[in-house]
Image (spheres, grey):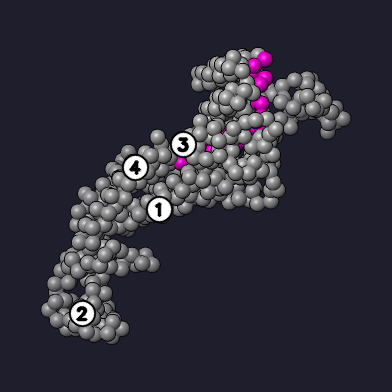
């Protein structure tokens, strides 16, 4: 490296002049190009433009209400905000080299458009409360959009469960066939996990629903603002209680990322099951051609890439959560620039999740279940062993003893000493034959929440009610 090369950043910074940053009154030199390149968040936080403008409108209305801004100046700034919003929407907004983030860009443009009045926009506000406010508005909306994606997937799964009628398949433990259950029961199991995810999304929403606007840089302000009023104006349920906390709290981002990560883990498990079910070895499910992929080399292939990526992306969702927690863990109060690192993982997890929900919904809506293959697997007589033991229990045999007697029949059958049905009938009597007919165990599986038809009928109704209630909860929040 020559001396010349080393001097270059400084020279280019000087060439950029002193204008263009919000702090040019304080620092003599313009920022180095490399500083701007390293610290700017504009490349990704321009996604917050709409929320930044909305929050600024509320801030301006608040300033007018308390007399910090004249009606006339308020109108001028609001007009400039609207013009900037239109430019951003149409793509005509020209970003300047000094625009390090979306807040800077909007304020600069408003000041260009509204002149002297524009210079009053940032009264009693810091980017520290501003960015937290924008991000909370964004998170609230995106959590609801994600919640709607969850509802859609639940509706698809519940619809398939309805269609599945009395189709049966084995329930598995240790990936070994365990006991027959209804296909509807299996599909609804995923629905209930998703219902907890939806609950967590709504819970995260509630804690995001607090306005930090008015916390200023972190200590509040000497100017007579009314944060309760701006909170209400922006549709927040409450305002912050502590200004230091307000500008440094990113719990709402971490909670959103956790909720998305766990939802991602659920989709990953569903994806793994689809991959397994679609394999030639299992053959419980055939993908619609529009939801399958082929191989560039092997002409015969039909691959479940959507399900694999639902499984694979969950790693990224977990990484985004862990990354943010690591960013937050050492931060002293209050605002630190590290907090800017909250946005890329948040934006990524939301986008990945919304894509995964839509793709899995489409895949599951169009896939065909091979219920004959499922039934053949479910009708393996050995899967009735527990029910056979339970018949003995019904006659007063202690369960441990009943288990031993049926296990003896299983062992003998596997050792080639006879047919399991005959061996079981020898232990249980003719009732064994009723249990061993195809689907025979299911009618007996009557315990509440279990996998037989009577219990599943109740479950279907309860889930439909839950789905309707959750849809209503989302609608209330989305008012
Ligand atoms: N781009 C910043 C962020 O995302 C905005 C806040 C900047 N505040 C500051 N004191 N430099 O966090």
* Residue at left offset 14%, top offset 74%: 433
- Tell which circle, 3 or 2, labels the residue nearer the N-terminal end: 3
Label 2, label 4: how many angstroms apart (C-alpha)?
Answer: 44 Å
Q: Quadrant of the N terminus?
A: top right
Q: Is residue 130 above or below residue 86?
A: below
Q: Is residue 190 left or right of residue 106?
A: left
User: Alpha-carbon neighbours of circle 2 within 10 Å: few (<14), some, or many (≥20)?
Assistant: few
Q: Main secondary structure of the magenta part?
A: helix
277, 268: nearer the viewer: 268
Q: Are marks 4 and 1 in contact (CB under 8 Å)?
A: no
Q: Which residue is mark 2?
A: 394
Q: Quadrant of residue 56?
A: top right
Label 1, label 2: how many angstroms apart (C-alpha)?
Answer: 36 Å
Q: Which residue is mark 1?
A: 196
Label 3, label 4: how many angstroms apart (C-alpha)?
Answer: 16 Å
**Which structural element holds mark 4?**
helix
Instruction: Report if residue 113 is visible in the image.
Output: yes
Numbered disc in front, either 2 or 4: 4
């Amino acid at each position: 490296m020559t001396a010349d090369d080393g001097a270059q950043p400084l020279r280019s910074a000087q060439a950029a002049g002193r204008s263009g940053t919000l702090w040019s009154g304080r620092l003599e030199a313009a920022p180095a190009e490399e500083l701007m390149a390293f610290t700017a968040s504009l490349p990704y936080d321009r996604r917050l433009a709409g929320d930044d403008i909305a929050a600024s409108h509320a801030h301006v209305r608040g300033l007018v209400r308390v007399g910090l801004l004249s009606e006339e100046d308020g109108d001028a700034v609001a007009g400039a905000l609207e013009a900037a919003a239109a430019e951003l929407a149409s793509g005509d907004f020209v970003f300047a080299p000094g625009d390090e983030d979306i807040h800077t860009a909007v304020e600069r443009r408003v000041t260009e458009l509204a002149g002297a009045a524009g210079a009053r926009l940032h009264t009693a506000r810091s980017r520290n409360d501003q960015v937290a406010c924008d991000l909370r508005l964004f998170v609230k909306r995106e959590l609801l959009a994600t919640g709607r994606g969850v509802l859609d997937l639940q509706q698809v799964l519940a619809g398939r469960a309805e269609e599945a009628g009395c189709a049966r398949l084995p329930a598995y433990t240790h990936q070994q066939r365990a006991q027959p259950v209804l296909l509807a029961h299996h599909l609804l199991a995923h629905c209930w996990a998703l219902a907890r995810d939806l609950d967590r999304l709504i819970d995260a929403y509630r804690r995001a629903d607090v306005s930090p606007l008015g916390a200023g840089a972190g200590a509040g302000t000497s100017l007579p603002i009314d944060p309760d009023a701006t909170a209400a104006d922006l549709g927040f349920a409450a305002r912050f209680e502590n200004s230091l906390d307000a500008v440094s709290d990113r719990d709402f981002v971490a909670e959103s990322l956790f909720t998305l990560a766990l939802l991602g883990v659920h989709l990953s498990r569903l994806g793994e099951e689809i991959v397994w079910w679609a394999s030639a070895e299992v053959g419980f499910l055939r993908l619609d051609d529009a939801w399958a992929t082929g191989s560039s080399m092997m002409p015969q292939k039909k691959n479940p890439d959507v399900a694999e990526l639902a499984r694979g992306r969950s790693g990224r969702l977990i990484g985004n959560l862990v990354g943010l927690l690591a960013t937050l863990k050492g931060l002293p109060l209050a605002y630190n620039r590290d907090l800017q690192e909250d946005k890329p993982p948040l934006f990524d997890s939301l986008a990945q999740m919304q894509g995964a929900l839509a793709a899995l919904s489409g895949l599951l809506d169009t896939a065909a279940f091979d219920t004959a293959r499922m039934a053949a697997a479910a009708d393996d007589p050995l899967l009735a062993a527990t029910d056979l033991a339970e018949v003995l229990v019904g006659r007063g045999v202690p369960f441990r003893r009943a288990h031993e007697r049926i296990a003896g029949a299983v062992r003998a059958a596997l050792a080639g000493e006879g047919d399991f049905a005959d061996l079981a009938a020898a232990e249980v009597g003719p009732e064994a034959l009723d249990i061993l007919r195809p689907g025979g165990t299911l009618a007996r599986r009557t315990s509440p929440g279990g996998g037989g038809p009577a219990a599943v009928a109740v479950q279907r109704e309860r889930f439909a009610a839950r789905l309707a209630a959750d849809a209503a909860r989302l609608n209330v929040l989305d008012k």
